[in-house]
Each structure stands twice: as C-alpha cells, then as structure tokens.
Image: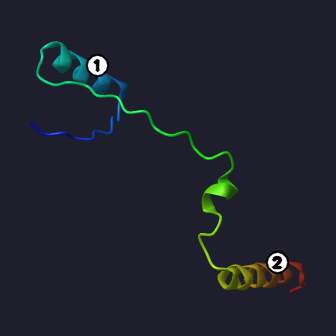
C-alpha cells in the first residue's frame, strides 16, 4: 500500500476519487489544513535581515524620488 498526496485541478476530480472509494479501490483520508496566519505581515516577519530591509527601503526611496523629478 502507498500513500499519495493529490492536488485536484478540477471539481470533477473529487467525484472520480469518490467513485473509486465506493468501488473499494482507494480510501480518501482528509487532512485538516492549518488556517493561514492572521496577517500577511506576520507570515513574512523575519524573512530578511534588518540590513537587507534597510537597503531595500533606501532603494525604494531613491526610486520614488526619481518619479518626482522633472525630465
């Protein structure tokens, strides 16, 4: 026996799997997925160093200043 993880791309896929389960060919085991974190910022907090964040903020500031100047 082998356990697989399957990603369904269309709703009809679930119906096919349920038919296979009814024929006693497979057994569907549903796993509870954890809820997503409350905020997107909480999910990415700490993903880059403070130094990288400072460099990125400086780049963004320079980029914004370029939009403000007259050409």
- Which residue is at 70% across, 79% downward? 53
Rendering coords of residue 43 (x, y %): 61, 56
In this picture, residue 60 sits left or right of residue 68:
left
Rendering coords of residue 20 (x, y %): 17, 20
Label 1 environment density (alpha carbons within 10 Å; few <14, some 14–19, many ≥20): few
Rendering coords of residue 60 (x, y %): 76, 78
State the mark number for residue 64: 2
The quarter of the rendered structure image containing the C terminus is bottom right
Write down the residue under mark 1.
Answer: 15
Q: In this rendering, which labeled residue sits more in front, label 1 or label 2? A: 1
Measured along the vertical axis of the image, is residue 21 above or below residue 65?
Answer: above
Assign a secondary structure to mark 2: helix
Assign a secondary structure to mark 1: helix
- Give me the C-alpha separation between circle 1 and circle 2: 52 Å
- Which residue is at 19% across, 39% downward? 3
- Which residue is at 50% across, 40% downward? 34
Callout 1 touching callout 2 (CB < 8 Å): no
Q: Nearer the viewer, residue 10 or 27?
A: 27
Label 2 environment density (alpha carbons within 10 Å; few <14, some 14–19, many ≥20): few
Q: Nearer the viewer, residue 25 or 70?
A: 25
């Amino acid at each position: 026996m082998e356990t697989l993880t399957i990603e369904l791309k269309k709703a009809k896929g679930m119906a096919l799997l349920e038919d296979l389960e009814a024929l006693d060919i497979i057994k569907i085991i549903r796993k509870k997925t954890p809820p997503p974190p409350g905020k997107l910022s909480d999910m990415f907090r700490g993903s880059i160093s403070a130094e990288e964040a400072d460099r990125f903020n400086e780049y963004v500031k320079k980029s914004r200043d370029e939009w403000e100047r007259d050409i």
